[in-house]
Image (cartoon, rainbow, N blue to C red):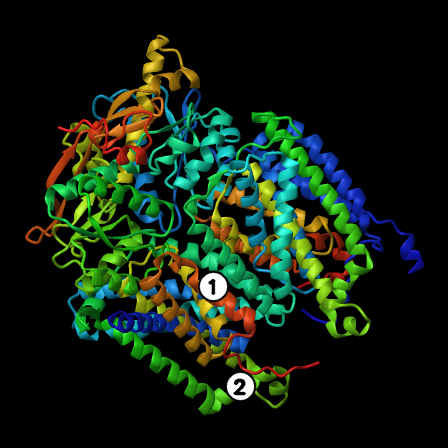
Amino acid sequence: MAAAALRRDFTPVILTAALVLLLAGSAVVPAYLRFLFELALANGLAVMGLMLLMRAGLVSFGQGLYYCLGGYTAGIAGSFLGISDVFALLALGAAVAAVVGLLCGLLIARYREIFFAMLTLAFTMVLYGLLINNERLGSTDGFNVPAPHFLGWAPEGERLGLTLFVVTCVLVYVVALGLHRYLGSAMGYLGEAIRENELRVEYLGASVRRLLLVKYVLAAVLAGLGGVLTGLAVGHVDPDLANWTTSGEFLFMALLGGIENVAAPLLGALVLELVRSYALEYAPYLWQMTLGATMLVIILFLPGGLWSLARMRKGADLTPEL
Amino acid sequence: MLTLVVIVLDGLVYSSWLFIVAVGLTLIYGVLRIVNVAHGSFYALGAYVMASAAGYYFARGLPPQANYLIIPLAALVVGLVVGLPLERGLLRFFYGRDQVVLVLVTYAAFLVLEDATKLVWGVDPYYAVEPYRLLGTLSVGGLPYAVYDLCLIGVAGGLGAVLWWGLNRTRNGKLLGAVIHDREMSEAFGVNVTPIFTATFVLGAMLGALGGALTAPEISVVPGVGAEVIVLAFAVVVTGGLGSVVGAMLGALIVGMARAAVIHLAPSVELFVVYLVMAVVLALRPQGLFAPAAARKI
Amino acid sequence: MSAKVPVRAERRENPAARKVLGTVAGALAASLLAVCLPGRSWAQENQGSIKISFVSFLSGPASGPFGVPARNGAEVIVKALNQGALAAPYKTKGIAGRKIQWKFFDEAGGPQQQVAQYRQLVEREHSDVIIGYISSGDCKALAPVAEELKTLTVYFDCGSPTIFEDVDVNPHYVFRTGPHAMMDEAALARYTVGVDPNVKTLAGIDQNYDWGQESWKLFLAAMEQLKPGIQVTASQFPKLLSGQYGADISTLLTGRPDAIYTSFWGGDLEAFILQGNARNLFNGRRLLLSAGEPAMYRLATQIPDGTVICARGPHGVFAPDSKLNRQFRKVYHSAYGSWPTYPSYKIAQAILGVKTAYENAAKAKAGAAPNTEEVIRALANSKWVGPSGPVELALANGHQAIQANAIGQFKYDRAKGRPEIVDIKRYAARCVNPPPGVKSIDWVHSGFKGAQCD
């Protein structure tokens, strides 16, 4: 182990390199591509939260609940309360997600496996139903989110897109670094311990329930932040953000990228966006089939996700597969 | 008073439909521990096969009364042509993996089947209403009801009884019980698990297709019908208790009655009453109302 | 999940970290490369042509009744234009002498997906014009994006009046060449009161989503103006695609309304009619279908005679006879084996409006190719004739179309085995559309102030 400890932790390097690459790239690549990356990063936040839960053995089918809450918080604050500062909106979205996450988490943290998945699904579908019944919030059509300000500065058009992209990149970078630190801490490692054997963790003197609650709330906050950023980037929110298909897509992204490193969910989110964009372009009649087939190939041949490609040579036994 | 009678009758009809649509899902989960998203595809395929076969049948002027034979036939065809290859060609490679992986695998299969269905039938709606109209109406408290709908109650009851009997009172059913309870132990005692899994999956697929085939005469079959049914069937099965036939019946009754009551008394909340019932039941009793007892293995 | 698998989540002790870095960089580079590749090549690629991207539902429940008929309608018109084979006044080849290159895209995936796709249509495909969008949600989300990306965008179908009334109140790049839902509901209400002057009770059943809720709101408000004191016996909002209307039909039956209104479309409309028929729901009652026309051929034997049918404009069977209309119907029918319905007409109307504007702008420049701003100037407040008659961009600073409307009753001709529409009434455009600057719902509540009816 001593020798292993001397080896460097490359994740911060990778993340920093990716950040630099993205920021530098944003000046060169066409705006639609930047937008695709922005959506992928925002979704990636939600998927990182999902990863946190999955590492503890909990699979949520309802991260869309917090994602949607984040988006709607940004939209309502912007359209009805006149709050449009991007940082205030992020804080607000995170706070709402945290409060709801805590309330639901108190109930949900008792459940495991498929029951956990089903209950999270039920919660998100209740929100979906509530929003569709609400005509003031545009029912199924949703409503447009006004353009955000940045500490009093109100850019427009291309400059707004660019600024929002930079904010998204930096936020995701900071969150990813923080999450990486967390995963490397005792609390982070206890997640895997819970997944392997809950009883033993309890015997060791840790409170499984509290640990899971913390992870659940953290995941909710991350999904909420992702929702805020998506709402601002797209400029529109609608109840589909809470539909089960959205949550299913997050799971797909997690599976696609893998869950062994904080960067893996981001990779998964990015690849899915790209695959979908190209499927819609080249096979407008068969894009669902293309997505489904990609999904099957990944699950069958890369059970650890794309990230596991990096250590093929070490053998599959190190890959935490689902 | 009339309202109450109407609510109960509407609720019963809807519950029966829910049960028929959802029971295959619970059966497959009970044995294979797969939450089968592709159940929606079986439903859609059953509906499409029935609608086109019945259309052909009536266009040929064959004896109208015998058309009801197409319904089980459609289910059989879908079960064997789609269910069997799906289990043998795909799902079996994932046995032993996490339940959630299997959810995603079946979700992927659902996406593929959705477009495959579109390739075969196109995007135009199909309908074949003759079987629905043939049985006429029956007046209950002055309100006309379609006899076909009332028959669904009988079909659901019969289906439930046969499944219960088959699972609890036959040799094969008991073998199935053993496999559910402890797969390794059953294998050690010489039970050949593979054909049991395959047979259960195909049966579940047939039940899903049967739901679609029974529904086809009263709807117009369009792309997307399958997706709608999935979440509904989940809600029913989860409310009742995953893996239990009696639970599915109970879940269907609760959800169906709740929806009928809400439509009559408070139509604005109809949309999410199903999920609300599911969330409340799960919050109080996570394993569902009627889950089979599970032995805890450490 | 196997308990035997040791989970080494952290990469801290991984000697292969460099490989990880390499993989990430490789994946990023590969995806960048993939994305920067040019898109699917344009049909009939050539220099100096006009690129039009079309978007409508090619999958999902709205594809059968709306998306695919729209696609087919666009194909008929574009092909005829490129051959220079379309009837007068559109005899000239292509658009302003330039060939039309076109591509069709799926509207699936909701606003999020559509905004991403829209940006690609502008920046990757370099579309000159984007024509499309059936869902009001997509239209609302895309309006600000279109204004930002400065691309001529023509909505051909989406029906919500709020798009220019609340969302994009000062449109520049966005046009809607089809009238919005207000026109349908105002005309339908006038027609209903005209044929059933004694209507006293009314029931509504609409899908629980924006279009259903808004249609019912506008129709009911219009009925309350035209027939004060009208009673509503039930208003049901079943879930989209629920397919099971047993309990809803019971509530409609118990209220014994004189008329039943529905804005259902597609599979839901068909299921509702089948199930309502089986329970004698429509016996002795007027059925009002605000978007019923696409279903009238397919459900010909099922729709009760006397059902009031609206085509969201004078489209399909309502279209006045003209050489253009005859040609459109004939070519469409021989290509697809079915008659064009309102989505086909509406997309045709959108293309011809764009063609007219391009050519007027080119004429002003003595034949030189006009830029987007010049086309927009020519399109705003313009008038042209589509296969369903004259169209005028009269509302929202000349960005929102108004059109005459026509409504009639369904009748199945058993001898000929085909459906027909009888008792057609026509409404002048300014009779059933609000005047400029007035919001639809305010216009209804004001008692249709300023309506110019014959």
Give the image location of residue A95, x and y in percent.
Answer: 64, 48
Q: Residue at x 32, y 25 (%)?
A: C395
**Chain containing the residue with disc 1:** B
The foreground one among C78 and A105 is A105
Instruction: Say whether mark 2 and mark 1 are on the same chain.
Output: yes
Calculate the distance from the C-alpha at mark 1 to the C-alpha at mark 2: 32 Å
Vertical placement of residue C34 versus C371, above or below: below
Q: Quadrant of residue B49?
A: bottom left
| Residue B177: numbered disc | 2
Residue A146 shows in the view: yes
Give the image location of residue B24, x and y in percent.
Answer: 44, 73
| Residue B276: numbered disc | 1
Residue A258 shows in the view: no
- Farthest residue toward the top? C366
The quadrant of the picture occupied by the C terminus of chain A is bottom right
- Among the two numbered marks 1 and 2 on one chain, the one whose residue lies closer to the N terminus: 2
- Farthest residue toward the left? C415
